[in-house]
Image (cartoon, rainbow, N blue to C red):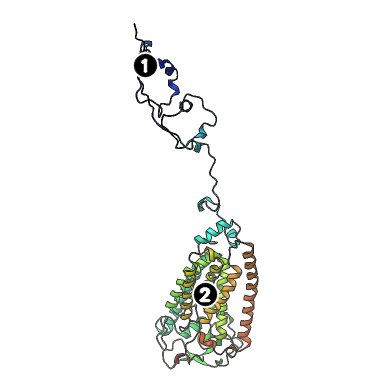
Amino acid sequence: MSATPTNKYALDHDHDHDHEHDVSESDSKPLLSNVRNPAQSSDANLAPTYEPEYRYSYTDEHFNYYPSGPSQSQAKLDDPFTPKPEDYARQSQYEQLDYAEPLAVPMSKSPPMMRKQPNMFQRYFGLYPLEQRIEDKKRGVGVQTHPIACYVLSAAMLGVLIYELVTNSKAQGSPFSFKPVVNPMLGPSSSALIQLGARFPPCMKNVPDFPITTAVPCLNNTDNPATRLCSLEDICGFGGFHDKTPDQWFRFITPIFLHAGLIHFLLNMMAQLTASAQVEREMGTLSFLVLYAAAGIFGNVLGGNFSLVGSPSVGASGAIFGTIAVAWVDLFAHWRYTYRPGRKLAFMIVELIIGIAIGFIPYVDNFAHLGGLAIGLLVAMALYPIISPSNRHRIIVIALRLIAAPLAVVMFVVLIRNFYKADPSAACSWCRYLSCIPASYNNHCKG
């Protein structure tokens, strides 16, 4: 005779046996269980079982705490063999990831590699989203990646410098001129620079203070005073003066590729391959070449008007100052997007002062620096891509562009006409001191 179970858990054993698969086998499983396999004998099912009066505590995905374990309805849903409602999978934040749509990231917050990169044309004219243009400006991303023109120009200038030193070496026996006057830039003599294309007004027009009959030291002269003299036409070279009137107008251009010496070349290339190269990346090669040529030529035009007529001038400093002017336009146009703009402005002022100070060195013309800077500001205002975050800003930029371009043309015309038709020194007798420190070797800035 079998004993009748008196434990309340034994009385409910049959009910629990019917629903043993409805209870979760994880969090809601009792600590101790003697529930037998249904395949066992019926006598074993009648044996009394012991279950504790507590269950494991339970915390759902919303961090709600259940000290008695999950509810019966939740336990049934947790059972893998129980049919689930359609929205059951979305009740858990973790399982919802399998059903979520791809995350839509705003353009301004998406990483650069996820965006469609604009081409060179779109970058120059700003034909892509404003947020991306602003971020590109902050990251220093410009119209193109490589400053091709700067590389080509620097290589060409290096070749010309080597040719200068070879020419002086053939004439004086040394690539560097030490007699009759020492070239502090470690370069050729002034006569060699003139013959190779330096800006020298007596080779470009009739100069009353330096007539065509004036004898000048030959390239091979090493004596002071000079003992080997040549005619002006021979020193100017390039075939001489065909109608006996100096007309070598190209000397507004050729000095850009010449340098007074090795030191002068290194200083210019350091600026050209850093500051000018970044300007080319931001503007593009075509616009950069227009700026570079305009600044270099105008610097020589201004220097031809007001510098000493008897001193040759060479160097790409005017063109480089024109590219540096772009940094000023960029700073004030994009002040809000510039990192520490006040500090950058202070550094730019110091650089400008140093550049002007270098202009007082022999064979280097400060007017080329100032002229390149002035025309560079105008050309940069006309061609440099500027970000306009508002209609008011855009209207101001367009107005300045319309003013800058014609003004640059007017300055060219006026100064070129003044160079050939008038006496510039008569109009401004003190201007020469902006590029000359009075000394005995320059006749106290008188020629």
Q: CA distance from mark 1 to mark 2?
A: 101 Å
The quadrant of the picture occupied by the N terminus is: top left
Three-letter code for the amino acid on which mark 1 is drawn: Asn
Three-letter code for the amino acid on which mark 2 is drawn: Phe
Q: Is residue 145 something that shows in the picture?
A: no
What label does residue 7 carry, if any?
1
Give the answer, above or below, for where 137 lies relative to 348: above
Choose the circle earlier in sequence order: 1 or 2.
1
Helix, strand or loop status at disc 2: helix
Q: Is residue 166 left or right of residue 214?
A: left
Q: Is residue 18 something that shows in the picture?
A: yes
Give the answer, above or below, for where 399 lies relative to 62: below
Dot 2 alpha-carbon crowd within 10 angstroms: few under 14, some 14 to 19, many 20 or more: many
Which quadrant of the structure image shows residue 18? top left
Residue at figure coordinates x 54%, y 68% from the top left:
330
Residue at figure coordinates x 42%, y 20% from the top left:
20
Towards the viewer: 96 or 367: 96
Q: Position of residue 58 (x, y in %)?
A: 42, 32
Query: Which residue has dot 2 on it?
Result: 321
What label does residue 399 carry, if any?
none
